[in-house]
Image (cartoon, coloured by chain):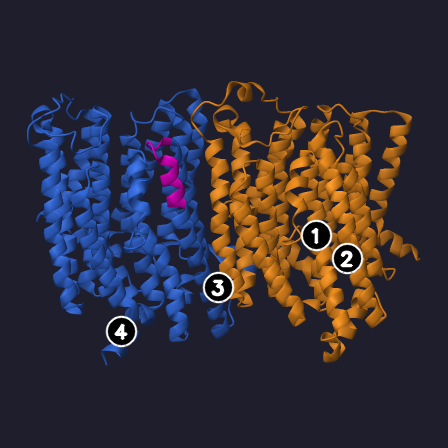
């Protein structure tokens, strides 16, 4: 039942915030903040109370579940369920959600009520994606997060917002519809094999089908998630959407929406079609490596601060993709840690760009420079997260990338070597960005205010979490571990066959 | 004719009776309010009488009309839609400088024609219903004759509809010449009898001509030429009526005719319908991209939507019939809602059909713009709306019959469709200030129009979130359909 409440609270708070917008701009902000905070408290409380269960849950059982018939004629259920992987993602979503409300406190002045309505509904949609185990419900939530995100970009974005919003919408919608076709294909294949019409995830696992069918259906799912991830060459929507979105929009895009793609790969693509995924793995991993290098090179070439951070996302998510398709314990652990670390470091960088933009009204790296003297805390925080992004040991991203490389090495040596080059490449863009924005002469004579109370309140927890994840990632790994075991079990027969 | 047949036909009799009562009432005392109220009461009575007729289903009231639960379901749908159109028309006509009362007589006659179409199981009733509907629509399209556009729309519709009716008649004659019968069940029995007949040129030519006639009414490509002009020219509530009731009744008939006669299993007919579906999806969506008039955008989008419906229609079987029925319900709600917004924003001089009329509407009239946006999202098939569930059912039907080519074209073209829906949405939510005269011309929202839109929106979301109830109603209804 808690799972439904998590979503309902956000939906309700969104509606309430919209209505409350009539009475003053402060109301929607507080309502949203309290709702997201209350949800987060619920999740953390649940986590604390079920600590023992979370870490050694018997395989194939959910931590929490809610199941009701929805459209019985088509075998559709309103089925939400949570395992360790979902738990991590849900907690991350709510935490980032709070940050998103906080970081738009001053930035958004027009249509505040409707803005927070959209914000809350995106979060609700994302929770739905992370919790749904009925494929129809999953698709429903997948599409649901699209519209509010579109509004967020199209109404409160920067100069080219309409173009970016439509591009984002079209890319996601087309790939989503292809996934819907694959879902329906799977539905009928399953009926053909068993005589049962169902969208239930655990029933669809292990549906027997010919390799050709499996490959086609797998590609349907894969494309949808690859667009969201984003995987090279499906990434062109990302730089525009990230750059044009308001700060909270970029934050949610980078920290959460991209993760839904990775989550979908882990939860659906490989377990539902283990054979096809295995056959496709070399291609997916190669594309992952291409993404790593391509993203890093393009990030290096950007002059727009925000666009640069956007391209680093392509690079980081390449690691995640690489880890997922290596499909062994180390690589998957790396992928999950990488997902969380990327949410923190890149999300924080986007907020930092937003804060800089509020002060200087520019995102052009050529216009900036020498900010360290005038805003030492801001610059220091910026360097901290950039170091996180380039994978400095001690911070979260390092753990993720290291584990992915370790895991991938056992699957494919050459690709691992190339991906390692990507780690090196990230140093270039990272150091260059710090140099151009914060060091050097202050040619334009910037005098800006340093980070103040609310902004420190945002950056502080992000820094602590990123550092914590880098120094002691065990809680995350332990929480993920039982979920991973049951995911792996559903693919084991195929993997061992291939070994033989 | 036994009295039980009269009871089975009660809904039709009530509609016909209401039109006479309304006509007499106008002769005695001319009052817009009274006339529209009488019309609403008559429609409500007809709706209620569906439950009376239901006790007798399925029955054949004469060889011409078949009263089964399938027909009653669609009767309910068009009666409800007509009810909404009457409410919308009231405010619209109040602003017009013409005689208002006869409008409702024409509307009732058109609904009677649609009802006959839905019930018909014979070429004679088919044609009768069609003409009853069309003749009333000619007059309705040109009803606001003080303006140029409605007149143009009326004449265009008259000429083209009369032409297509001639094609239809000739097609019926050819089939009759070969088979010697005009009843759908008899045609079905003969066609399923021998392979020889299926290749007979007379049958094929006849079927092709019937497809032409049907395709015209449904505005399928290549018989769609009239649609944008009539949609643009006709008064907004009439456009809503043409888009929903007239097309819905014809589609109900299409399903009944081609399933019952098994005409859709004829190879060439199937091929022709596939090509028409593909052409409609492509042309409708691509040409809509080029429009800057809201009514024309909706016209082209309706062409595309009928193409989507054909995909499910071609799939055949249980999945298809219920998907078609559900999608039509969703399409009715959405189209009435969209044209409803156009209607309430229209003034006495012109309809609010320019994209500029909607610029930044959200910031001035958040509820109205929100309703419009929801309707557009429903057309685009976004969750929480009936259109999403409807499109899902269409795709399910298509995939169940492995019509992969059609289904993939449906997916790709509906993504193209997103462009123009988003264009309107962008304008609705635009943050820059609109031109002063546009902002000043916003008419106030009446209680009746507002509540109609609210009810449509509630239905839209209800079907989008919890379609199970409507689906069970539909499943019971389509079970009675012969030839599934």
Q: Are marks 3 and 1 on the same chain?
A: no
Q: Residue B41, located in which quarter of the rendered image?
A: top right
- Residue marked by disc 4: A495
Q: Which residue is mark 2?
A: B167
* Colour-to-chain, blue: A
| Residues at discs 3 and 4 in contact (Cβ within 8 Å) | no
The quarter of the picture where residue A321 lies is bottom left
Q: CA distance from mark 4 to mark 2?
A: 63 Å
The residue stretch that appears in magenta:
A156-169
Q: Which of the numbered marks, if any, corresponds to residue A198? A: 3
| Image: A187 above or below A22 | below
| Label 3 element class | loop
Which quarter of the figure is the C terminus of chain A placed in? bottom left
- Which chain gets the orange colouring? B
Q: Is residue B91 left or right of residue B395?
A: right
Q: Is residue B386 left or right of residue A420?
A: right
**Which secondary structure lies at badge 4?**
helix
Mark 3–mark 1 Cα distance, whole angstroms, equals: 39 Å
Closer-to-camera residue (A44/A74): A74
Circles 1 and 2 in contact, beta carbons < 8 Å: yes
Q: Is residue A230 magenta?
A: no
Q: Residues within 10 Å of mark 2 (few under 14, many from 20)?
A: many
Check residue B216 in the rendering and tell me which mark sits there, or answer none.
1
**Which chain's residue wears label 2?**
B
Mark in front: 3 vs 4: 4
């Amino acid at each position: 039942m808690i799972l439904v409440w998590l979503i309902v609270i956000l939906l309700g708070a969104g509606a309430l915030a919209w209505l409350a917008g009539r009475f003053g701009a402060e109301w929607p902000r507080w309502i949203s903040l309290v709702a997201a905070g209350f949800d987060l408290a619920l999740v953390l409380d649940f986590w604390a109370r079920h600590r023992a269960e979370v870490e050694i849950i018997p395989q194939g059982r959910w931590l929490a579940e809610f199941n009701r018939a929805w459209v019985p004629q088509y075998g559709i259920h309103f089925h939400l369920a949570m395992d360790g992987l979902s738990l991590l993602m849900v907690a991350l979503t709510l935490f980032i959600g709070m940050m998103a409300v906080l970081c738009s406190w001053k930035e958004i002045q027009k249509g505040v009520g409707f803005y927070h309505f959209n914000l809350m509904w995106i979060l609700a949609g994302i929770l739905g994606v992370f919790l749904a185990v009925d494929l129809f419900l999953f698709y429903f939530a997948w599409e649901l997060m699209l519209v509010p995100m579109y509004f967020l970009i199209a109404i409160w974005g920067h100069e080219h917002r309409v173009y970016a919003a439509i591009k984002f919408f079209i890319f996601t919608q087309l790939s989503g519809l292809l996934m819907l076709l694959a879902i329906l294909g799977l539905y009928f294949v399953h009926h053909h094999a068993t005589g049962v019409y169902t969208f239930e995830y655990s029933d669809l696992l292990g549906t027997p089908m010919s390799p050709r069918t499996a490959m086609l259906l797998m590609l349907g799912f894969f494309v949808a998630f690859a667009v969201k991830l984003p995987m090279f060459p499906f990434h062109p929507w990302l730089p525009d959407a990230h750059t044009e979105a308001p700060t909270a929009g970029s934050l949610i895009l980078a920290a959460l929406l991209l993760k839904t793609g990775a989550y979908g790969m882990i939860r659906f693509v490989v377990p539902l079609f283990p054979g096809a995924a295995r056959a496709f793995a070399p291609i997916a991993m190669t594309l992952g490596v291409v993404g790593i290098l391509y993203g890093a090179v393009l990030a290096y070439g950007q002059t727009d601060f925000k666009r640069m951070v956007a391209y680093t996302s392509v690079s980081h998510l390449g690691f995640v993709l690489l880890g997922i398709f290596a499909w062994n314990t180390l690589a998957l652990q790396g992928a999950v840690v990488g997902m969380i670390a990327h949410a923190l470091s890149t999300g924080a960088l986007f907020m930092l760009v937003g804060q800089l933009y509020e002060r200087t009204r520019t995102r052009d790296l050529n216009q900036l420079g020498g900010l360290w003297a005038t805003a030492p805390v801001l610059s220091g925080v910026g360097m901290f997260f950039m170091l996180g992004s380039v994978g400095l040991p001690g911070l979260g991203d390092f753990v993720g990338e290291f584990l992915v490389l370790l895991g991938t090495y056992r699957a494919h040596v050459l690709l691992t070597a190339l991906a390692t080059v990507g780690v090196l490449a990230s140093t270039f863009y990272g150091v260059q960005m710090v140099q151009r924005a914060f060091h050097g002469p202050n040619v334009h004579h910037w005098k800006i205010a340093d980070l103040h109370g609310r902004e420190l309140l945002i950056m502080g927890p992000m820094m602590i979490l990123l550092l914590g994840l880098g120094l002691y990632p065990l809680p995350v790994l332990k929480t993920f571990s039982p979920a991973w075991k049951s995911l792996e079990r559903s693919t084991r027969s195929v993997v061992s066959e291939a070994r033989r | 004719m036994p009295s039980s047949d009269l009871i089975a036909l009660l809904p039709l009799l009530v509609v016909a009776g209401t039109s006479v009562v309304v006509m007499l009432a106008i002769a005695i005392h001319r009052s817009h309010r009274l006339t529209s109220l009488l019309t609403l009461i008559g429609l409500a009575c007809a709706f209620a009488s569906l439950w009376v007729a239901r006790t007798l289903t399925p029955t054949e009231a004469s060889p011409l009309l078949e009263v089964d639960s399938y027909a009653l379901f669609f009767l309910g749908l068009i009666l409800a839609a007509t009810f909404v159109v009457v409410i919308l028309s009231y405010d619209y006509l109040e602003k017009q400088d013409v005689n208002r009362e006869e409008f409702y007589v024409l509307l009732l006659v058109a609904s009677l024609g649609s009802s006959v179409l839905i019930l018909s199981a014979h070429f004679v009733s088919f044609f009768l219903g069609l003409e009853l509907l069309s003749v009333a629509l000619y007059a309705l399209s040109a009803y606001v004759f003080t303006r140029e556009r409605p007149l143009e729309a009326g004449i265009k519709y008259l000429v083209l509809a009369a032409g297509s009716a001639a094609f239809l008649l000739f097609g019926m004659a050819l089939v009759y010449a070969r088979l010697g019968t005009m009843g759908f069940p008899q045609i079905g029995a003969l066609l399923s009898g021998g392979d020889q007949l299926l290749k007979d040129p007379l049958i094929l030519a006849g079927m092709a001509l019937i497809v032409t006639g049907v395709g015209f009414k449904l505005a399928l490509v290549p018989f769609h030429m009239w649609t944008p002009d009539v949609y643009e020219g006709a008064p907004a509530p009439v456009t809503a009526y043409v888009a929903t009731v007239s097309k819905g009744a014809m589609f109900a008939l299409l399903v009944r005719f081609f399933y019952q006669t098994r005409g859709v299993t004829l190879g060439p007919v199937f091929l022709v319908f596939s090509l028409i579906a593909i052409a409609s999806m492509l042309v409708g969506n691509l040409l809509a991209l080029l429009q800057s008039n809201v009514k024309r955008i909706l016209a082209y989008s309706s062409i595309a939507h009928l193409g989507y419906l054909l995909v499910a229609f071609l799939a055949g079987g249980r999945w298809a019939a219920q998907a078609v029925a559900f999608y039509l319900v969703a399409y009715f709600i959405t189209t009435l809602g969209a044209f409803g917004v156009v209607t309430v924003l229209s003034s006495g001089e012109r309809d609010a059909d320019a994209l500029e009329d909607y610029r930044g509407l959200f910031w001035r009239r958040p509820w109205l713009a929100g309703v419009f946006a929801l309707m557009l999202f429903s057309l685009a098939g976004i969750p929480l709306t009936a259109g999403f569930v409807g499109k899902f059912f269409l795709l399910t039907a298509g995939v169940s019959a492995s019509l992969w080519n059609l289904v993939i074209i449906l997916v790709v073209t509906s993504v193209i469709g997103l462009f123009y829906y988003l264009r309107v949405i962008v304008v609705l939510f635009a943050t820059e200030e609109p031109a002063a005269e546009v902002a000043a011309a916003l008419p106030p929202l009446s209680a009746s129009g507002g509540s109609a839109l609210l009810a449509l929106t509630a239905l839209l979301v209800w079907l989008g979130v919890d379609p199970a109830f409507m689906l069970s109603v539909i499943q019971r209804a389509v079970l009675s359909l012969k030839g599934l």
